Image (tube, grey):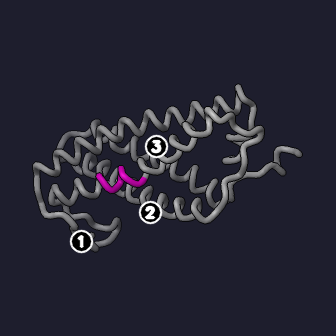
């Protein structure tokens, strides 16, 4: 069996995986670059808005991705994982899915609690707020969003290291299934 005939994830799941990865990176870069600009400047606000809408795009794609994943089958890893790796692998993937769903929801809840009017980009259409304004809640949600975000980066790093371990050390097809 050659590398191209081995089972892989569907093209849709592969594309969504890499698109979500790029968008998560973009969201991180937007929020980090925000610090380059003084408070109250249009540039700083633009970075925060780009971070916010990139996060909501991740949420929309994550819902689609979860639906596709639940509908399809996972291609087997060749050679098969030893039992001691199978459970941590599943837990890591569940954590990644949880992060890409929870992080944007926390960001959205933070904006609502902070009484921000959220306009759909390039329109005057405002999203309806589903939370009453509460500055104390907004600060707690923002702190939680940041703390969970830092944990998310560690989990992403672990995911990347695991993929490299499978590719370079174990020499199985784990990484190739997603390429």
On screen, 5 above or below 69? above
Q: Which mark is residue 60?
A: 2
Residue 92 placed where, x, y %?
51, 40
Q: Which mark is residue 128?
A: 1
Q: Which mark is residue 25?
A: 3
Identify the residue shown where x is 28% and y is 57%.
108
Q: Which residue is situated farthest in the top direction here?
A: 169
Is residue 167 left or right of 64 when viewed as pictured? right
**Gap between marks 1 and 3, in whole Å?**
27 Å
Choose the circle earlier in sequence order: 1 or 3: 3
Circle 2 sits in a helix, a strand or a loop, which is it? Answer: helix
Is residue 7 left or right of 1 when viewed as pictured? left
Identify the residue shown where x is 29% and y is 49%.
48
Residue 64 placed where, x, y %?
51, 64
Choose the circle earlier in sequence order: 1 or 2: 2
Choose the circle earlier in sequence order: 2 or 3: 3
Magenta stretch: helix, strand or loop mostly: helix
* Nearest to viewer (mark 1 / mark 3): 1
Identify the residue shown where x is 26% and y is 43%.
144
Crowdedness near tag 1: few (<14), some (14–19) or many (≥20) residues, C-alpha within 10 Å: few
**Residue 105 is covered by the magenta coloring:** yes
Q: Which residue is situated farthest in the right direction here?
A: 1
Q: Which residue is situated farthest in the front direction here?
A: 83
């Amino acid at each position: 069996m050659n590398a191209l005939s081995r089972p892989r994830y569907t093209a849709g799941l592969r594309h969504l995986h890499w698109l979500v990865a790029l968008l998560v990176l973009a969201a991180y870069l937007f929020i980090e670059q925000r610090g380059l600009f003084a408070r109250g400047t249009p540039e700083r606000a633009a970075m925060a808005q780009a971070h916010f809408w990139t996060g909501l795009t991740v949420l929309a794609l994550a819902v689609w991705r979860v639906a596709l994943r639940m509908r399809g089958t996972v291609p087997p890893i060749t050679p098969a994982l030893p039992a001691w790796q199978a459970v941590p692998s599943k837990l890591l993937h569940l954590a990644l899915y949880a992060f890409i769903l929870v992080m944007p929801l926390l960001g959205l809840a933070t904006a609502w609690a902070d009484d921000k009017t959220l306009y759909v980009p390039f329109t005057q259409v405002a999203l309806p707020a589903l939370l009453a304004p509460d500055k104390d809640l907004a600060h707690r949600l923002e702190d939680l969003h940041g703390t969970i975000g830092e944990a998310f980066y560690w989990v992403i790093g672990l995911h990347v290291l695991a993929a490299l371990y499978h590719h370079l050390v174990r020499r199985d097809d784990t990484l190739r299934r997603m390429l």
